[in-house]
Amino acid sequence: MLATGAQVLPTWQAIGLCATAGHAFEIRNLVVPDTHAFDTEPTAATQRGALYRFLFGALAYVTLAAGDIATILEVHAVALP
């Protein structure tokens, strides 16, 4: 069920994965209240500990890189038995 004003963008382009999907979505003219948002600046952390002060962009980059490496290793294992 889509939220009011949400539009699914059919961006899933994969060969042989017909039963899966990973579309993007778009929502326009929506105001998100401050109570439903967070600040990614380390100085805005409300909890103690290094994890809460880790740079959000760096964490996202490392997470995506790990996924890319796993995909490359899997493709390599299939392509070169």
Image: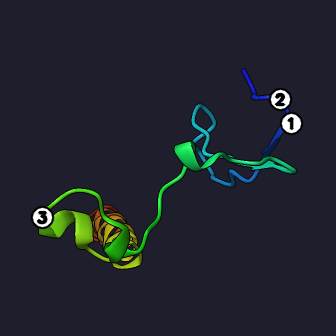
Asked whether residue 48 is in view, the answer is yes
Earlier residue among tags 1 and 3: 1
Earlier residue among tags 3 and 2: 2
Disc 3 crowd rating (10 Å Cα; few below 14, some 14-19, many 20+) is: few
Q: Residue at x 78, y 50 (%)?
A: 26
What residue occupies the far left of the structure in this picture?
49
From mark 2 to mark 1, how far is it between C-alphas?
4 Å
Q: Secondary structure at mark 3?
A: loop
Which residue type carries mark 2? Answer: Thr
From mark 1 to mark 3, how far is it between C-alphas?
38 Å
Q: Quadrant of residue 65?
A: bottom left
Where residue 6 sits in the image (x, y, percent)?
A: 81, 38
Tell me whether circle 2 and circle 1 mark residues in contact (CB < 8 Å): yes
Residue tagged 3:
49
Disc 1 crowd rating (10 Å Cα; few below 14, some 14-19, many 20+) is: few
Residue tagged 1:
5
Where residue 57 sits in the image (x, y, percent)?
A: 41, 76
Of 35 and 76, the residue lying toward us: 35
18 relative to 64 in the view: left or right: right
Nearest to viewer (mark 1 / mark 3): 3
Q: Residue at x 32, y 71 (%)?
A: 59
Q: What label sits on residue 61 in the rendered view?
A: none
From mark 3 to mark 2, how far is it between C-alphas?
38 Å
Which residue type carries mark 3? Answer: Gly
Q: What label sits on residue 4 in the rendered view?
A: 2
Asked whether residue 68 is in view, the answer is no
Q: Secondary structure at mark 1?
A: loop
Q: Is residue 71 above or below residue 10?
A: below
Of 54 and 61, the residue lying toward us: 54
Q: Is residue 17 above or below residue 61?
A: above
